[in-house]
Image (cartoon, rainbow, N blue to C red):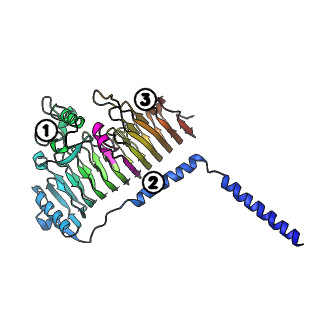
Amino acid sequence: MKTRLRFRIYTFLFFLIAGLALNACKETPKDQKEVVDVFATADKIIKDIIVPQFPDKNYNIMDFGAVADGVSDNTQAIKLAIESCHNEGGGKVIVPAGNFLTGPIHLRSNVNLHLEEGAVVLFTKDSKAYLPVVHTSYEGVELMNYSPLIYAYKQKNIAVTGKGIFDGQASETNWWPWCGAERYGYVDGEPQQKDDHNLPRLRKMNEEATPVSERLFGEGYQLRPSFFEPFECENILIKGVTFTNAPFWVIHPIKCNSITIDGVTVQSHGPNNDGCDPEYSKNVHITNCVFDTGDDCIAIKSGRNDEGRRVNIPSENIVVENCEMKDGHGGVVIGSEISAGVRNVYVRNCNMDSPNLERAIRIKTNTLRGGFVENVFVKNIKVGQVKEAVLKINTYYAIYANQEGNFIPTIKNIHLEDVEVENGGEYGILIKGRAESPVENVSFTNVHIKGAKTPLSVENSQPIIFKNTTINGVEY
């Protein structure tokens, strides 16, 4: 009897252990495991970002002499309110309802610049108001130039919040003509950014590693300032506000760490009016935003050519989610200033739709820029229509002449999943890699593209991995 009982127990244990071992050996399908792990990583990036907190103290700019008539210069009143808030340990600088004209605003640590509903901050059209020059950047190259409209240099725990509007007042009569395009007000014969004393001079300084302190521009030059530029800052919050009529790039965190951009609207259709350009920056969360822009909605950067390689700070750990992209050259773009590289970009739960949106996801570089792009994950995206392509990867990008050099870019691990496209434009997928460095490991899972004139145009890429993917109703 005891022998029979022991036999039954041993038999039961044997099959139990065998069953557990069998289950342990069953691998989750590779693609499913990858998706779960990837977006768990995105969640961890968000969780680890420090969102600044501020003491419960208010500093109303009206108490420092501000006048809400849209005409009086409130530069000093706003500066005094910010300095008082900073010097007394931090808090909230309040801009109440009304129209407030000002020059550049320089944020300080532990200050939350808060625009109440109905508040409109109007930035002066007088370029001289943005002097003296400050340490800033233009198209991926550092220089001393006009102050950004809102600027913070080496500060910590800063915020711009509220329901108000920042209006840069840039137009065809100021700032925009300097781009050199007639449709933005340029008149033939007037100075513009492509003149020898502007961009060509800055490009040469880049090549020759001229110290930034000697790269003096500003008055007498035609390089436009960014709208909001935190430079070498930590723990940044931009929430709820609207930016419009920017001179140049709109939100440009450069060499920053721990950035939250939440519920922001960018509605600005000027030249180079990118919505958000994280550059040499890491741990960035862009969520619940609306981008309606004259250039890329979001463009992730990491320096131009020699400068980017010298600085050598990749942009990484960037999560974009729950956003709406309307007009723009691209929805989420990486490049072209990309010489230090970009990695670990996560895009999910976004809507992209406009007859003036050219691409949904875009990567652009060349052999002067070089750099690398790796680990880009896109999930649950709805695209109404795009002009050119759903995904465009171009390693021959050129807007200026002579864009060939000796720095071969590498692009790998680009994954799109659960993407629905109603009108794919000229191409469903457009990839132009290099024979000496083909694009690697691109996959499409549960992607359905309708209305693409040319389904695929692919050069110098490893075979694309398709899983349950259709273009114009044809399964790939």
Q: Amino acid at mark 3?
A: Arg
> Is 319 placed left or right of 463 in the picture?
left
Please, what secondary structure does the residue beneath circle 3 have?
A: loop
Q: Is residue 82 above or below residue 302?
A: below
Judge left or right: residue 475 versus residue 297: right
Distance between the alpha carbons at the discs numbered 2 and 3: 30 Å
* Magenta stretch, residue numbers: 291-320
Residue 166 in the image: above or below residue 2: above
Quadrant hosting residue 153 = bottom left
Mark 2 — residue?
42
Q: Closer to the observer: label 2 or label 3?
A: 3
Could you tell me residue 22's position as x and y percent? 71, 54
Magenta includes 298?
A: yes
Amino acid under disc 2: Ala
Q: Which mark is residue 221?
A: 1
The reply to whether the C-beta atoms of the residues labelled 2 and 3 are less than 8 Å apart is no
Q: Dot 1: within a 10 Å radius of its alpha carbon, few (fewer than 14), some, or many (20 or more) residues?
A: some
Residue closest to the eye, 355 or 213: 213
The Cα atoms of the two marked residues, 3 and 1, are separated by 37 Å
**11 sits left or right of 368 in the view:** right
Tell whether 461 sits left or right of 86: right
Specify which label sits upstream in the sequence, 3 or 1. Answer: 1
User: Depth check: 221 or 475 in front?
Assistant: 221
Dividing the picture into quadrants, the one containing residue 189 is: top left
